[in-house]
Image: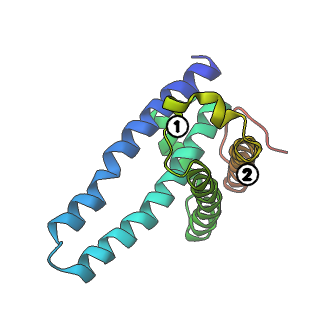
């Protein structure tokens, strides 16, 4: 399987797993809605694990691009690369930073659009704003930066754990 096909299959698996997971914290919080502290604890723990899960899935995409693995195997391999509490905590922290940056961009974009329906007014009204163009550019930089950071983390983990593989990260 070629590189683009491996990444495509792995991204489909990642989205499917993520869509399955995000339902559970909300389901359990709703089940315990009569106990607000328990419901809040479930949502906080669920959110923390969701950020970690996003990091594992992102690392799985890098594994699919650089190794001869795809789908669930690439995700599992990425998770195994993070073996050890220090690496997991480090990667969780990095993922939190990346999620915070993309969340800030999304929040700023919502403030700019202010709930207006740009499809009725015409899409060009949205595209012509300089602030929107700047936010879209910044989001693109954040996405590229996240893949660079993920690749560097992958190479560091692979070099440290001495897995045999296709790429040499030296």
Seen from the viewer's position, the closer of residues 110 and 12 is 110
Residue at position x 31%, y 45% in the image: 20
Which quadrant would the N terminus be assigned to in this image?
top right
Q: Secondary structure at mark 1?
A: helix
Residue at (45%, 39%) from the top-left corner? 14
Asked whether the viewer can see residue 114, the reply is: yes
Residue at which label 1 appears: 74
Q: Relative to residue 124, is residue 31 depicted above or below?
A: below
Tell me the residue that label 2 is attached to.
149
**Residue 1 drawn above or below residue 166:** above
> x, y (%) of residue 156?
74, 54
Quadrant for residue 33, please give it.
bottom left
Give the color scheme: rainbow, by chain, secondary structure or one colour.
rainbow
Of residues 1 and 16, the one nearer the viewer is 16
Q: Is residue 83 left or right of residue 161?
A: left
How many other residues sit within 10 Å of disc 2, few (<14), some (14-19) or many (≥20)? some
Residue 8 percent across, percent down from the top left? 53, 25
């Amino acid at each position: 399987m070629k590189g683009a096909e491996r990444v495509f299959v792995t991204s489909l698996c990642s989205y499917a797993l993520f869509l399955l997971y995000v339902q559970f914290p909300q389901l359990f919080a709703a089940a315990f809605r009569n106990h607000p502290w328990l419901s809040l604890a479930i949502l906080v723990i669920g959110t923390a694990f969701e950020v970690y899960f996003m990091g594992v899935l992102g690392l799985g995409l890098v594994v699919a691009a650089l190794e001869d693995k795809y789908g669930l195997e690439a995700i599992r391999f990425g998770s195994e690369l993070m073996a050890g509490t220090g690496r997991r905590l480090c990667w969780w922290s990095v993922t939190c930073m990346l999620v915070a940056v993309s969340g800030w961009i999304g929040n700023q974009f919502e403030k700019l659009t202010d709930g207006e329906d740009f499809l009725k007014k015409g899409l060009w009204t949205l595209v012509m704003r300089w602030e929107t163009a700047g936010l879209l550019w910044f989001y693109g930089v954040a996405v590229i930066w996240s893949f660079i950071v993920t690749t560097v983390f992958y190479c560091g983990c692979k070099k440290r754990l001495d897995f045999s593989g296709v790429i040499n990260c030296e």
